[in-house]
Amino acid sequence: MKPEVYAASHPERPAIVMASTGRAITYREMEESANRFARLLRQRGLQRGDHVAVMLDNDPHYLEVVWGALRSGVYVTPINWHLGPGEVGYIVEDCEASVLVTSSRFAANATQLAQRLGRVHTRLSMDGPFDGFEDYEASVRELDGGPVPDETCGAVMFYSSGTTGRPKGIKPPLGDEPYGAPVGMEMLLDGLYGVTEESRYLVPAPLYHAAPLVWSLAVHRLGGTVIVMDRFDAVETLADIEKYRVTHAQFVPTHFIRMLKLPEDERRRHDLSSLCMAVHAAAPCPVEVKRAMLDWWGPIIYEYYAGSESNGYCSASPEEWLEHPGTAGRSILGSVHAVREDGQEAAVGEVGQLWFDGGAVFEYHNDPDKTAEAFNTQGWSTLGDVGYLDEDGFVYLTDRTSHMIISGGVNIYPQEVENLLAMHPAIFDVAVIGVPDEDFGEAVKAVVQLAPGYSGDEATAQEIITYCQANLAKFKCPRSVDFMDELPRLPSGKLLKRKLRQRYWQT
């Protein structure tokens, strides 16, 4: 369904509530604002299949901008605002955006993009103009709040790291369905997770991430209320669940760990009885953490394994997880296969690369080679994960073929960091790996072979970290640096990263 149905039937129902302030945006207000943005896009010449980029924090207007783009038949690309100017510029160029929406908070970053914005003819700032960017509110204020006459369904095009370390756009096809036709996530939240018009869904994570944004849009399709936190805070999360009588919420394992580390009296003093379902994804959850959360919140914690590619979906209810501890779920969208290196399906319990059969079709924007790598000759597609299936078809994740680091639910590709650090004068050779971290699951570590004349002391380690932070988003950078006389490589030059990782992951 589409939000305008609820704007007509329940115009004063809150569609969005900002948790920190209590500010509510009704369905009527969100609908009118989204329509004005859609009309602005048409006024500026955007048609079906064009692109809009959005770089905002958890702003009250974030969802209206996305809804305005979706009803215009265009692609909308959310951008992680933690990225550096070069990284943001690459995404804006690669997605071929002709409109960029940001805010003055990111003016310093945005103004450094001038050379990368040649295609961007409309540059909007949500909270007042700055150099090169016009005021969003002034641009849409006088436009009609009714729907554009040629409403057609657009799509969100997320970016994720690829096998070369450069972000890749995950481009779904634009279907022929009319705007407002049911979509898969809407039916999933309705049928599997029990979201209704009365639901109140808490978003503790950034809306530029796939799951928080896609789930929020689906909640709106079902007439519920989306409660948006500025950022995750363990105490505030518990307080917000109580204050807003939250019924549904989504987390990553790091959120669980932070809440579990709160003092017992802090954990127990909040009334969480309204919470009907908490779902987690993005990274495997340690078994002991999951058990502790089930002990605390009861059997309301669901898990799923999926990707922005929407090529598969595995789900585990609390009861299923307790029967299969450590599982990431069983496929409910087509079939999932573990495939050995020789191309044959792995036996039950045997590790192989995971492939989905029967999921959505997708492509990596402007990269046919990466698209081809994601599919096999049988038409199955992969996210690059490694794991195994048990006798009941439940999936267990064991590794990632790309050595992707998952820190706090965020994917970090080491090659990008290695490419940068390789240019540092003190570094002769470098490997970036994920190492165990109690809070984040994994932390980024650089293992360095120094160039002649440099010493492996704390000052050099800090210099390397600072150099990285000056050139990449901080969350991608090493939190620690170790030094080795020589990194393990084959005569061919291939780095034996698995051997390197074993030094830190031995139990």
Image: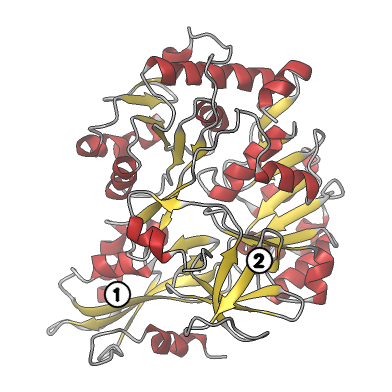
Disc 1 marks a residue whose amino acid type is: Ala
Q: Which amino acid does label 2 sit on?
A: Ser
**Left or right: 283 as drawn, with respect to 82:** right
The reply to whether residue 166 is visible in this rendering is: no
Q: Dot 1, crowdedness within 10 Å: few (<14), some or many (≥20)?
A: many
Q: Name the residue under label 1.
A: 461
- Using the rendered view, name the quadrant where residue 323 is placed: bottom right
* Secondary element type, mark 2: strand
Neighbours of disc 2 within 10 Å: few (<14), some (14-19), many (20+): some
Q: Is 192 situated left or right of 184 in this image?
A: right
Q: Name the residue under label 2.
A: 335
> Which quadrant would residue 7 be assigned to in this image?
top right
x, y (%) of residue 40? 44, 17
Residue 199 falls left or right of residue 416: right
Give whichever of 295, 167 is nearer the camera: 167
What is the x, y in percent for residue 464?
A: 27, 69
Q: Residue at x 85, y 62 (%)?
A: 299
Query: Image point 48% across, 51% down: which residue?
Result: 362
Extreme residue toward the left, this view = 453
Q: Locate residue 365, reporting x and y percent.
A: 37, 49
Compared with 491, 302 (above or below) is: above
**272 and 348: which one is in front?**
348
